[in-house]
Amino acid sequence: MKKIIAALLLGMSVQGAALANEVTIYSGRGEALIGPVIAQFEADTGIKANVRYAGTAELATLLQEEGDQSPADVFWAQDGGALGAIAPLFADLPAEVNEGVAAPFRNVNNKWAPTSGRSRVLVYSKERVEEADLPASIDDLTDEKYKGRVAWAPTNGSFQAFVTAYRVVHGEEAAKAWLEGMISNETKVYRNNGTQIEGIANGEVDFGLVNNYYLGRYVANDAEFPVDQTHFEAGDIGNLLNVAGAGIVASSDNQENARKFIDYLLSTTSQQYITLEGNEYPVVPGIILNSTLEPFDTLVEISPEVDIDQISDLEGTLALLRDVGLL
């Protein structure tokens, strides 16, 4: 009997050790970009990462459905809206985690940590658009001169986060009026950010609404790629600064390794990789920016003042998009 008990205790010990040497991550960030970061985390720490990749909204919904039974230790989201929506399910982070983050990205409530930033931009054709044709504000795109010339991707998570921010800053009726104005102006629907850029290059449209990092991927392969990008006037909601970020699931029994993973995402190694390979803004000081990015001071100047935690009403945005016929 003693041998049986000893064997059971040994099994429990081994199981506990295995748990202590693993971390389960729900990732709304794509494997192509962040897979190498996770692989390097495993190599540097000896902690095995079990990763479930899916869309940010899908994983956020899954976490809510699973509740305390979720196997996830960390949720790494593509946008701040999802992080705000899921924040009640996160454990509090120590204040020092966010104290090391640059102010525009920081989560003051310490429920999650930003891992990189992306700015919304206007992409346009170098061949068919003159500087005088560039709109000062995203609201200008409802003008007759842009009819049938603009692309957007209503099913894209970052676009939906932008619409949520528009609702927060300008109100529900103004957001609905802008969407309806764009629809009346024959804005063309594309699947995602990349297909908008390709549509411009192919002559299908002249403008598109995307995140800043996509164009750099095309220019890296073709220095003469016929698309450029710009921001709207300083403070315009079209310049929304959004973040990817990660939080520790409060029900996790493995919060120590979850914290190690978040610390790793904020390390110089990870931050430098994400900006150089992903064309995204690092969120901690001292990182060399990708050459495609605006200087940090310029980014702060042009970005609208929006509390990222306030852009969490994704359901309200989805309802609005359905109401105007975009979903």
Image (cartoon, grey):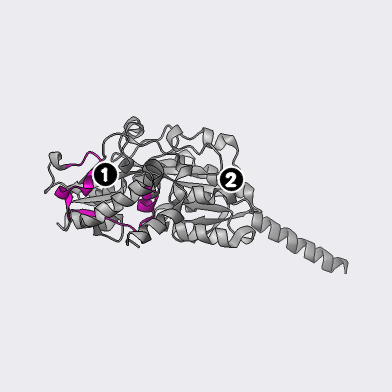
Where is residue 279 drawn, in percent x and y? 34, 45
Report if the CB atoms under discs 2 and 1 are less than 8 Å apart. no
Between 6 and 34, the residue placed more toward the observer is 34
Label 2: element kind: helix
Q: Is residue 186 left or right of residue 299?
A: left
Q: Is residue 226 visible?
A: no
Q: Is residue 129 in the magenta section?
A: no
In the rendered structure, which amino acid carries the disc numbered 2?
Arg
Q: Quadrant of the C terminus?
A: bottom left
Residue picked out by circle 1: 138
Q: Residue at x 48, y 56 (%)?
A: 27
Residue at the right extreme, as displayed: 1
Question: How many numbered marks are there?
Answer: 2
Q: Residue at x 32, y 45 (%)?
A: 120
Where is residue 7 drawn, in percent x and y? 79, 66
Q: Is residue 233 visible?
A: yes
Residue 259's tag is: 2
Question: Residue 111 is drawn in which quadrant?
Answer: top right
Neighbourhood count class around disc 1 (C-alpha, 10 Å): few under 14, some 14–19, many 20 upward: some
Structural distance between the alpha carbons of marks 2 and 1:
39 Å
Where is residue 153 drawn, in percent x and y? 30, 57
In the rendered structure, which amino acid carries the disc numbered 1?
Ile
